[in-house]
Amino acid sequence: MDAIPQNTKTRLEHRLDAAGKMLLIFSGSWTVKDDLPDYSLISRIVQESQRSDVHQYVVDASKVHKWDSIFVTFLIKFLELCPDQVQVDMAMVPAGVQRLVSLARAVPEVEAGEKQTPPGLLASLGSKTFQAAGAVAGVLEFVGDLTLALIALLQGKAKSRSRDFFTFLNDCGPSALPIVSLISGLVGLILAFVGAVQLKIFGAEIYVADLVGIGMAREMGAMMTGIIMAGRTGAAFAAQLGTMQVNEEIDALKTFGFSPMEYLVLPRVAALSIMMPLLCIYADVVGMLGGLVVAASMLDIPIVQYYNQTVEALNLNHFLLGVIKSFLFGLVIAVSGCMKGIKCGKSAYNVGLAATSAVVVSIVLIVLLDGIFAVICDLLGI
C-alpha cells in the first residue's frame, strides 16, 4: 500500500488488489483550509492503474470526517480522468457527496472562451418576424379576452366588484385634476403667447381666442390629457398588475376561479375610458382660461370680447372630435398598461420594465391615432 500523507488531517491512499481493483481510501479533513494534494496525484494514480490493467475503481471515503466543495471537485476530476471502460464504485462515499457529484456531472461544462456564431441575416429576420407575430397574437388574445369580459359584464355575469370600479374612477378622475389643470393651463398660455407674437404683426390679436379655443378643443386638450394619463395612470396599472404577478396573486385568483380579466382589468379599463372624455373637456376649458390670461395681460383684449370670439370660433364638432379622441386614448392607455402588467415577468426589474413599456407604447399609439384622425378629418372636411 502506498500512502501519500499531506498533513495530520488529510490522507489519500491507494492500493491494487489481486482481483484487479484499485482501492482509493480518503480519510481525514478535506476542506479548502486543509493542505490538499494536487490534482496531478489523481492523474498519476490513473496512469498507474492503466499500466496494471485495472478494471474497477473502489472509492472509500468512509473515514472522511469533514468535507466541502473542494472534495467534490477532487472526485469529479478523478471521474473525468477515469477511462470509460473502467467501472467506479462509490458506494462508500457519503450520500451528500454522491448527489453533488451526480448533479455537477449532469450538466456539461462550458468551455472557456467558447464563442457562439452570430445568426445570419435571414435567421435574424426570421427570428424577428416570429417575435413580431407572437406579439401581435398576444395583443389579439388580450383584446379578445377583454371583449369577452365586457360581454359578461353587460350580461351581468362578470365577477368584478363595483367598489373597485369606483376606486379606480376616483384615481383616474378627481385625483388627476391637479396635474391636468397645471399642464392644460400652461399649454393654453403657450399657445396664446406664440400666437400673440405672430398675430401682432398683422394686427389680428383677437384671433388668439380662435387659435387657443380650436387648438385645445380639437388637438391639445385630448392629446395632453392622454400623455399625462399615460405617464400617471397607465404606468400605475402596469406596476400594480406586475407586482401582483410577481407576488403570484394573479395565479391565486385563477386558482379560486376568478378571471383576472374580469376582476382586475375590466374595472381599470372601464374607469379610465369613462373619465378621459370628462378630463378632456376640463382640460379644454382650463387651456382656454390660460389663453385668456395672456390675451388680457399682453394684448389688452377684454374678457367679454375674448369670450365672444371663442364662442363664435368653436362649434360642437370641435368638442366632439376631442371627446372621441380622448375616449380612444383612454382605452389605449388602459389596455396597454393592463396588458403589460398581466404579461410581466416575476421580478422587480420586469415590473419596472412593464411600467416603462406601457408608457412608451401608450404615447406612441396616442400620436399614431391622432395622426389617423387628422387624415380622416381632412378627407371628410371636418
Image: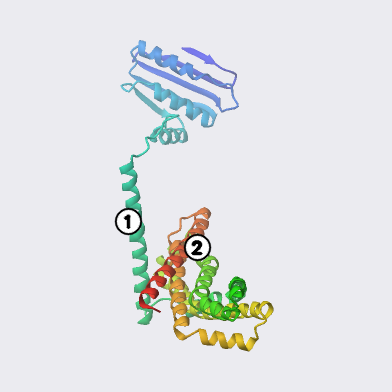
* Quarter occupied by the C terminus: bottom left
Q: What residue appears at the point 46 percent right and 66 percent down from the top-left corner?
A: 367
Determine whether 259 is above or below 34 in the image: below
- Looking at the picture, tell me which residue is in the foreground, 102 or 121: 121
Q: Secondary structure at mark 1?
A: helix
Residue type marked 2: Val
**Rendering coords of residue 9 (x, y %):** 58, 22
State the separation of the CA atoms marked 1 and 2: 22 Å
Residue 193 image offset from top left, x and y in percent = 62, 72
Q: Name the N-terminal-most of marks 1 and 2.
A: 1
Question: Few, some or many C-alpha atoms within 10 Å of disc 1 (few <14, some 14-19, many ≥20)?
Answer: few
Circle 2 sits on which residue? Answer: 359
Looking at the image, residue 345 sits to the left or right of residue 30; the answer is left
Circle 1 is placed at which residue position?
133
Residue appearing at x 45%, y 67% in the figure: 366
Q: Quadrant of residue 190?
A: bottom right
Residue type of the residue flagged with mark 1: Ala
Q: Nearer the viewer, residue 127 or 161?
A: 127
The image quarter containing residue 257 is bottom left
